[in-house]
Amino acid sequence: MKENNPDKFILTSECPIRQVLDRFGDKWSMLVVELLSHRGRLRFSEIGQNIEDISQKMLTVTLRSLESDGLITREIFPEIPPRVEYELTSLGKSLVPHIMSLTSWGIEHMATILENRKAYELKQKKTTY
Amino acid sequence: MKENNPDKFILTSECPIRQVLDRFGDKWSMLVVELLSHRGRLRFSEIGQNIEDISQKMLTVTLRSLESDGLITREIFPEIPPRVEYELTSLGKSLVPHIMSLTSWGIEHMATILENRKAYELKQKKTTY
DNA sequence: CAGAATCCGGCATGATACTG
DNA sequence: CAGTATCATGCCGGATTCTG
């Protein structure tokens, strides 16, 4: 939907905000980062127990993705039964304040947004009649 | 995956970060907000021309969603051909710094992340052989 | 020009079973 | 306990067509 636009594109497919959204806009990544920032070093099962509704598979996938990006470390203890612990790297920690920034906005404004949405629905109904 | 956990859940399905992600973690919403914050009041086609690869449908859907949440206003000019202009509300503007916060992190660290990911892939190959 | 309506495919996510 | 492997699916988003 761009056609021949004389101006520069501000928002190309490689712009920073899209890259961040593509990698961390998924359902679980930011939650894991925030959890680890609160609790420090945790093992696999502990993470799962503290994020409601995450499945074992998605927890594994999310942790691998964060590890491959260098946001968390993964340490395996050769015991039986096995134990694996995860922890934020300095890179991972550097992301936390920016997540908190979004979160704080949500805490402050999400109620208003839900009200707005309700009011909008009602308005739509009225004009439909 | 929670079972009986004595501790409080930090990250329930209604926690702020999830609410924000559910509503704005989609592919286009944050981009539209950021564009409008840069350019001020814009019409439908102008927005489409400045966000690479967005389809007409998704632009419409995204704008409606932002309007219903009270983040943007939508003004219709009864002309032929029609003209519709969009603009951030104060609520919408209040979100911008938090998006910029994420963006700035992306600008600073995304290259490192991509390198980490490549290195991780190589490491995986080596251990597979 | 700014959309509405419809159809459709792919991929993210979920559910289940199995293992060292 | 901490995963893998496989199969199933919902729905997000793209392509197309039509209209005031």
Image: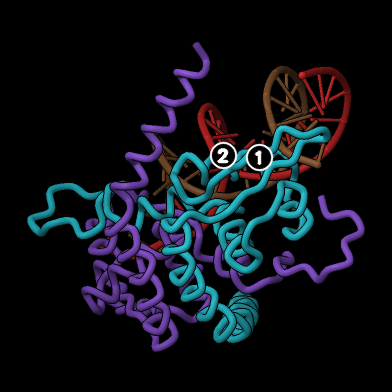
Chain colours: A cyan, B purple, C red, D brown
Callout 1 touching callout 2 (CB < 8 Å): yes
Bin the neighbour count of mark 2 within 10 Å (Cα to Cα): few under 14, some 14-19, many 20 and up: some
Q: Please give the name of the residue rendered at 56% of the width and 69% of the height, measured from the top-left corner.
A: B20
Q: Secondary structure at mark 2?
A: helix
Above or below, A16 relative to B72: above
B68 on left or right of B110:
right
**Quadrant of residue B22 in the image?**
bottom right
Q: Nearer the viewer, residue B69 or A67?
A: A67
Q: Secondary structure at mark 1?
A: helix
Would you say residue B109 is visible in this rendering?
Answer: yes
Q: Please give the name of the residue rendered at 75% of the width and 45% of the height, measured from the top-left corner.
A: A55
- Residue that label 1 marks: A60
Q: Please give the name of the residue rendered at 30% of the width and 79% of the height, measured from the top-left corner.
A: B77
Above or below, B106 relative to B42: above
- Residue that label 2 marks: A64
Q: What's under tag 2, amino acid-wise?
A: Arg
